[in-house]
């Protein structure tokens, strides 16, 4: 299940907020970029028109992901998923803070540096924090 909300605030939607909640009972096969069974994320985007770069965007988001009990037990019993394979899983919610900037240099040139701080990467308290 997924619930997603977006709230444009100003500048034709270039300034806005979002929130997303997702849940899965863990009994279905994972096939995605992540193996989260529950997730909550919130964030916002700010238009750079106010500092003279009308097509640039600054974004920031916070997220927390977790595993269902069934998924956690499977991994702890040396099970492997698409990206996770911890036989000694010290389960903890994965928490992420992310900031990104998209610079409009030319019509089709938009580099976008992105920084992430991740606590308990791969839902394992024995890892991290990681900086990407």
Image (cartoon, grey):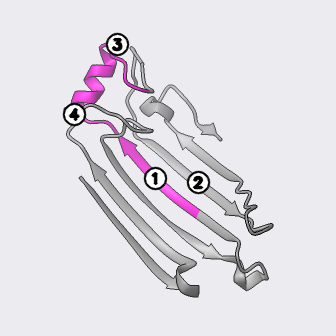
Does 73 sit left or right of 123 as displayed?
left
Q: Earlier in the sequence, mark 1 or mark 3?
A: 1
For marks 3 and 4, give the one nearer the viewer: 4
Q: Secondary structure at mark 1?
A: strand
Contact, CB < 8 Å: mark 2 with mark 4? no
| Residue 44 included in the magenta stretch of the image | no
Q: CA distance from mark 2 to mark 1?
A: 8 Å
- Residue matched to label 1: 63
Q: Dot 3, crowdedness within 10 Å: few (<14), some or many (≥20)?
A: some
- Sequence-wise, the earlier of marks 3 and 4 is 4
What is the number of the mark on residue 28? 4
Height in image: 114 above or below 19?
above
Q: Which residues are magenta?
A: 60-82
Give the answer, above or below, for where 113 lies relative to 50. Answer: above
Q: Secondary structure at mark 3?
A: loop
Question: Which mark is drawn over residue 128?
Answer: none
> Tag on residue 78?
3
Mark nearer the N terminus (2 vs 1): 1
Q: Residue at x 47, y 73 (%)?
A: 17
In front of the other: label 1 or label 4? 4
Residue 47 percent location from the top left of the image: 64, 77
Q: CA distance from mark 2 to mark 3?
A: 31 Å
State which tag comes first along the sequence, 2 or 4. 4
Residue shown at 79% from the left, 83% from the top = 52
Residue 25 on image: x %, y %: 20, 39
First-in-chain label (1 vs 4) = 4
* In the displayed structure image, the side of residue 36 where residue 115 appears, left or right: right
């Amino acid at each position: 299940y997924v619930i997603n909300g977006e709230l444009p605030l100003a500048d034709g939607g270039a300034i806005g907020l979002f929130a997303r909640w997702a849940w899965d009972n863990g009994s279905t096969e994972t096939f995605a970029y992540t193996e989260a069974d529950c997730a909550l994320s919130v964030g916002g985007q700010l238009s750079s028109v106010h500092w003279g770069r009308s097509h640039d965007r600054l974004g920031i988001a916070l997220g927390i992901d977790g595993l269902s009990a069934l998924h956690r037990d499977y991994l702890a019993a040396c099970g492997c998923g698409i990206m996770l394979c911890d036989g000694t899983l010290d389960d903890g919610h994965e928490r992420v803070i992310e900031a990104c900037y998209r610079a409009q240099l030319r019509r089709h040139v938009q580099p976008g540096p992105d920084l992430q701080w991740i606590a308990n990467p791969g839902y394992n308290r024995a890892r991290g924090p990681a900086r990407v």
